[in-house]
Image: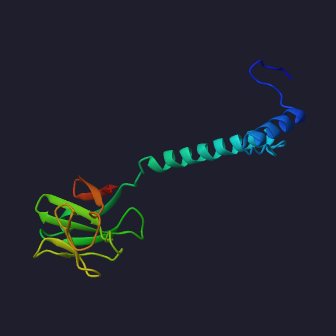
Amino acid sequence: MQSFACFRRVYKSDISRTSSAAIRKGFAITIQENPGTTRRQVISLFIWTTLVGLAAALWAFLRGRPKTYPARVVAQAADIPVGGSKIFTYPTDIEPCILLRPASDTFVAFSRTCTHASCNVFYHPEDNVLACPCHQGAFSAANGSVIAGPPPRPLPRVLLERRGQDLVATGLVKT
């Protein structure tokens, strides 16, 4: 084993001499002869800490990637009258959404799940709002923003494309 000039091996005789000298001066020093932590334990701890850090970084990377959504025809433009609505599911068959037609060439779609208590919202065309009956939350039918009540976030918006007469859902934007 290599020896360095700045490090000196401490022997039992040095410990007892240092301890008794310190006690004579009024200082109590406790010296542990065998620290109990081996080099193998330190290296093992370093390896496990590194692996956990890499796993956390991978999880954060995968979670932060943008999701891909399927393109799905949700309605025909001629089937929805101006001021009307249609309920559909997107991106899966268990996630309810609502399609609105506020003007002749304007279509907007939102998730129907309230961001407060996950109740379904309902369209009230006379007020131009999407209302949640659970806690009287209200969302704008124009952009999905919160108008009233306890919902903490706006409704997720469904991205739409018009392809001829088909209205195609292409994505979901959560704000």
Depth order, front residue of 139/148: 148
Depth order, front residue of 15/105: 15
Height in image: 165 above or below 56? below
Depth order, front residue of 68/165: 68
**Left or right of 12 on screen, residue 41:** left
Q: Position of residue 78 (x, y in %)?
A: 18, 65
Depth order, front residue of 41/135: 41
- Name the residue rendered at 10%, 61% in the picture: 104
Query: Which quadrant would residue 100 be assigned to in this image?
Result: bottom left
- Name the residue rendered at 60%, 47% in the picture: 55
Quick one: quadrant of the C terminus? bottom left
Height in image: 11 above or below 5? below
Q: Where is residue 119 in the image (x, y as percent from the top left)?
A: 33, 77
Quick one: quadrant of the N terminus? top right
**Left or right of 73 on screen, residue 105:** left
- Name the residue rendered at 65%, 44% in the picture: 49
